[in-house]
């Protein structure tokens, strides 16, 4: 159990923030399957200070997704502090600072992973945010900017000294984006260099991966990102492996379809059918992985417009896979 301010994180696996993916519907789903903690989609601190409606909509939280941190991004310490004050009004468990996003539109604007190029600025941002809010402040960093500037240990130490109470480390540089295998040794190095809890991130696609990372790096928690896409029960599997030291059976076809439909129904309830079904296209395609006829089914996913289309997709999956073992 990890103590973060007044929050107890009970479990070993948490849901990573992913822009355009980890919205309220997906967070609630993953928490329901045993995620111990989650982090919101990143919100622009500058946009928050300008009362941007779309940015504020990212921050709506529900009891079903607690404990949750709100993640903000930016590069100006004063603006980050003001943005954090606004985010704190939504009653998260913590404020998380994004220092790892590799997307060009973020990094090219001096934010996200670009902050790794200026460790001193990282410290000033953490200090400003920590002074501005009466909540724990956490950070998510990368291995470094590129192979010539691997500085996660330095940045982690600076952030800890400035007031960060937990540090998540993605084991790739910004230059590497998401392609090569993550370097778990850098997670080990950070864990050995700071006293606050360290979260390991990168290449957690199964319960076995989570166990290996915990053992190999000594990290306190693992953060699951892409491994949860179309696979929210990964948290259930990690918990069973850690707590019971035994695997649990993967979901059968009918459980998979039931969860998929429940997920998309939540999307539509929270965002309306038009937006919800448009966003459902990518999520349903992820649920198709490993199924018979997945290529044809993914085409159907890309054509979803109404929830009635979901019913037709579900029936097509059953017809294509009805010979496969399924859950009752």
Image (cartoon, grey):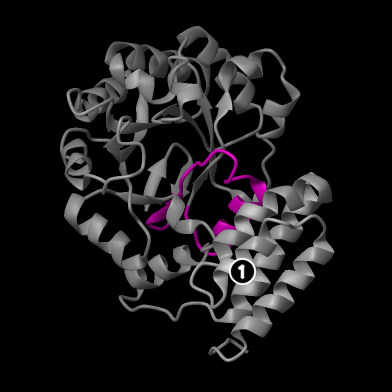
User: What residue is shown at x 53% (from left), y 90% (from top)?
Assistant: 325
User: What residue is shown at x 60% (from left), y 27% (from top)?
Assistant: 88
Residue 40: x %, y % from top left: 56, 39
Residue 155 position (above or below residue 218): above
Q: Is residue 11 magenta?
A: yes
* Residue under label 1: 296
Residue 218: x %, y % from top left: 20, 51
User: What residue is shown at x 29% (from left), y 49% (from top)?
Assistant: 220
At mark 1, the secondary structure is: helix
Q: Is residue 222 magenta?
A: no
User: What residue is shown at x 57% (from left), y 46% (from top)?
Assistant: 22
Q: Magenta stretch?
A: 9-36
Residue 195: x %, y % from top left: 23, 35
Residue 7 visible from this viewpoint: yes
Residue 272 visible from this viewpoint: no
Within 10 Å of disc 1 (Cα), the crowding (few <14, some 14-19, many 20+) is: few
**Location of the C terminus (image quadrant):** bottom right
Q: Nearer the viewer, residue 141 or 105?
A: 105
| Number of numbered labels in the structure image | 1
Q: Nearer the viewer, residue 283 or 66?
A: 283
Residue 92 position (above or below residue 205): above
Q: Is residue 36 left or right of residue 310?
A: left
Residue 246: x %, y % from top left: 33, 79
């Amino acid at each position: 159990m990890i103590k973060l301010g007044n929050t107890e994180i009970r479990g070993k696996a948490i849901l990573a923030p992913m822009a355009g993916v980890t919205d309220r519907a997906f967070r609630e789903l993953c928490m329901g399957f045993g995620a111990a903690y989650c982090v919101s989609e990143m919100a622009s601190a500058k946009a928050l200070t300008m009362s941007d409606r779309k940015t504020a909509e990212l921050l709506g939280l529900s009891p079903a997704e607690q404990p949750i941190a709100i993640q903000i991004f930016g590069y100006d310490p004063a603006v980050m502090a003001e943005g954090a004050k606004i985010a704190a009004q939504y009653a998260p468990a913590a404020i998380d600072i994004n220092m790892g996003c590799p997307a060009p539109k973020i990094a090219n604007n001096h934010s996200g992973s670009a902050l790794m190029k200026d460790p001193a600025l990282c410290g000033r941002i953490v200090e400003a945010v920590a002074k501005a809010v009466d909540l724990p402040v956490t950070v998510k960093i990368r291995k470094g900017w590129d192979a010539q500037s691997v500085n996660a240990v330095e940045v982690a130490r600076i952030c800890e000294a400035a007031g960060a109470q937990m540090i998540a480390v993605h084991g790739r540089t910004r230059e590497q984006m998401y392609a090569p295998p993550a370097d778990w040794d850098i997670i080990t190095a950070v864990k050995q260099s700071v006293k606050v809890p360290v979260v390991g991130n990168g290449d957690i696609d199964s319960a076995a991966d989570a166990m290996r990372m915990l053992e190999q790096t000594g990290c306190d928690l693992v953060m699951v990102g892409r491994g949860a896409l179309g696979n929210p029960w990964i948290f259930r599997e990690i918990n069973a492996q850690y707590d019971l030291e035994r695997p649990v059976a993967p979901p059968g076809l009918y459980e998979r379809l039931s969860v998929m439909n429940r997920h998309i129904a939540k999307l539509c309830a929270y965002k309306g059918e038009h937006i919800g079904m448009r966003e459902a296209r990518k999520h349903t395609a992820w649920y198709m992985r490993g199924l018979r006829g997945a290529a044809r089914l993914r085409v159907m996913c890309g054509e979803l417009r109404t929830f009635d289309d979901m019913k037709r997709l579900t029936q097509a999956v059953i017809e294509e896979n009805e010979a496969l073992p399924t859950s009752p």
